[in-house]
Amino acid sequence: MTNFKKNFQSFGKSLLFPISLLSFMAIFLGLAAALQNPAIIEVAPFLGNETLQLIFGFIRKLSALPFGYLPLLFAMSIPLGMVKRDKEVAVYAGAVGYIAMLLGMTYVLQAQGFTAETTSIAHLMDVEGLSQVDATLQNSLFTSTLGIFVYNTNVIGGIIAGLMGVFLHNKFRETELHPALTFYSGKRFVPIAAAIILAIVGIILAFVWPLINQAIITVGGLISESGSFGVFLYGFTEKIINPTGLHHILNQTFRFTALGGVENIDGESLVGALQIYLYQLDNNLQFSTDATAFLAQGKILHMVFGMPAAVLAMYKMARPEKRDRVLKFFLAGVTAVILTGITEPIEFTFIFISPILWVVNAIFAGLAFLVPALLNVAIGNIQGGIIDWIVFGMLQGMETKWYIYLIAGPLFFAMYYFSYTFIISKFNVMTIGRRETDFEDEEEVDESVSVKESDRSTAENIINGLGGLQNITDVDNCISRLRVEVKDSQLVDENLLKRTRPNGIVRPDENTIHVVYGGRISKMRNIVDNYIYEHKNS
């Protein structure tokens, strides 16, 4: 297996950490959101009880944790899953680097005059003279992450920081600085490098990201002018760019600008698919199918029927002994996607490891938008789960044509299932449960970590001088000393230790040995760590 393939699979597995939390919390988020939905409360008035609503509100707030901090979770989980040694250092570097990247980006934005205040909808309308629609769209380009005002890079920002954390850890973990700066050498230098380098990356992103945003808006214009094919292209584009977080830009463009439609109703000009739909809903008017074509109706086939079929395919293609674990892993995600239309807990398990499944998923998502539009379905709102299907479809009457999904849904289920099983089998896609190591907690052996031959004799002299591996209980270091705890001090052979040319040997107590190396301490600590790690996994 090539290093690239190993690293790519490790990357895919590392994403399971935030996805697991995301899928679990999504269930409670969906349930709480449903129980706070005015349409549901109207059917079951007892749910409107103030105490119950406070409880539901708290659950909803807590459940939103991974959604609000998902980029940071990715920045930490990628090093956690990909690094084999000193994981805590890499995770720390990923988090530090992500924050540094945000700070670099916000510094440029402030220099350009962009702040939370100057990009607020009120300021853009009152001071800049933008319309409400244009102000809303401009405001959607920015966000506040960890209290830092930045462009909304979503999970892509976290992935960049996480991968950089891995790279910098592997690059600088054994860095030896000038003896005067030896305290900052080795593992301590990794987060320092991450802070400096990722801050520069953030500065670069501040100039690059607006170009990406503009590209999405341009694509939106092309979609709007393409008729029925444009509806397909909208669903395809929204799904293909979903991991970047830029789908929010596309969504806002169609929901609140003329690209999503312009209609004059009762003498009032309404702009944007969502605004048109909500006005018609509020005033008991017939729904515009041109507007709803870009709303929830295009997601129901994909989310309520397609995603469960994709999970069934991955379950079927998993190793037989792993299937129970696969089912338990996906149960929360399936519940979330059916209830609320939150697809990330399922999609993020395969789109980063299989470009083919990613593209096929986007094509099917495009078809999920196209089919209801061709059949003049009229279901609005924005989520696309079964709640939207019931509340904005069934409860709004037969004219919404909600019943079409009873026929189209099973067809989409079959289309997803057979396509996914074929692709996974044909291209040997390593979805969850297909690797022998999936769901195993054992530490993977990193075969690339070994003691250099030139350092082997030094390592052997240190280890044997300390009484052998079995005699060592703990290894640490300070700015100049290798600090070792041993079981039996009688087994320590100082003559062997002296072969490594230490500045001195100190015995603070019966079971502690300090070997003084001065400015060489970082190198000597790495030699010892590599030797111990190699023999531990041999």
Image: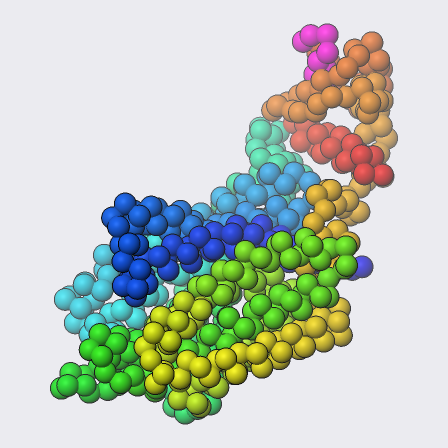
Q: How is the image coloured?
A: rainbow
Label tally: 0
Measuring from the top left, give residue 28's x and y in whole percent.
44, 52
For the point 47% across and 55% down, the residue is 27
For the point 83% across and 18% down, the residue is 467
For the point 41% across and 52% down, the residue is 64
Name the one closer to the observer, 521 or 249: 249
Q: Residues in magenta?
A: 508-516
For the point 75% across and 16% down, the residue is 486
Name the one closer to the observer, 497 or 332: 332
Name the one closer to the observer, 407 or 498: 407
Say whether residue 235 is visible: yes
| Quarter of the image where one finds residue 494 | top right
Q: Is residue 505 above or below residue 165?
A: above
Compared across the picture, whether 118 is left or right of 147 comes to left
Compared across the picture, whether 234 is left or right of 324 comes to left
Main SS, magenta residues? strand
Q: Is residue 342 above or below residue 55?
A: below
Measuring from the top left, give residue 465's x and y in whole percent.
83, 19
The quadrant of the image that shows the C terminus is: top right
> Is residue 36 located in the magenta-colored stretch of the structure?
no
The quadrant of the image that shows the N terminus is: bottom right
Q: Is residue 190 above or below residue 467?
A: below
Say whether residue 203 is visible: no
Measuring from the top left, give residue 12's x and y in whole percent.
64, 58
